[in-house]
Image (cartoon, rainbow, N blue to C red):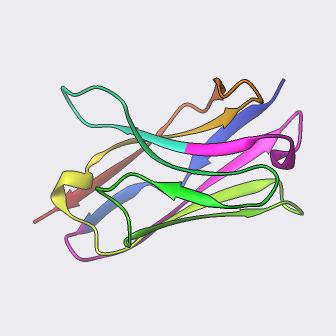
Amino acid sequence: QVQLVESGGGSVQAGGSLRLSCAASGRTVSSYSMGWFRQAPGKEREFVGVISRRAGSTYYADSVKGRFTISRDNAKNTIYLQMNSLKPDDTAVYYCTARNDRHVYEYWGQGTMVTVSS
């Protein structure tokens, strides 16, 4: 089992930046590929990006590619989502998740709200 707690959300103007954190407990983040999803008001949850367990390679949704960066700090058992050049369309609740070896996103945090104003 792993528990995930996101932080760092808030309000920012378009073009600004935020860094979200996801602190894990119970098991280390190095045991999982770690992902970020988001859910905007009235919309379905959508994939943002993932960092792999072994190689630390990353993959992003086209909508955030070049603007968002996922990283991990195994010593702090934490992953990060650096968000730059934010747009109003990035407004959503952002969720951290742990993916097991069956590629199932098994564990989820409670989410943190990001609001981008124009």
Which residue is painted at 26% across and 54% down in the image?
Answer: 90
Does 48 sit above or below residue 43?
Answer: below
Can you say which quadrant of the picture contains the N terminus? top right
Quadrant of the rendering where the C terminus is positioned: bottom left
Residue 78 image offset from top left, x and y in percent? 74, 55
Q: Which residues are magenta?
A: 13-35
Image vertical order of residue 94 relative to residue 18, above or below: above
Query: Which of 56 and 114 lies nearest the eye of the viewer?
Result: 56
Numbered-mark total: 0
The residue located at (78%, 49%) in the rendering is 53
Q: Quick check: 44 left or right of 95?
A: left
The reply to whether the magenta stretch includes residue 28 is yes
Task: Give percent across and percent down for residue 50.
Answer: 58, 49
Query: For residue 17, what is the image quadrant?
Result: bottom left
Q: Nearer the viewer, residue 19 or 53?
A: 53
At horizontal 64% and vertical 23% (from top left) the residue drawn is 104
Q: Is residue 80 above or below residue 17?
A: above
Up-down relation of residue 13 to residue 108 (above or below): below
Relative horizontal placement of residue 85, taking residue 98 as reference (left or right): left
Identify which residue is drawn at 32% across, 56% down: 62
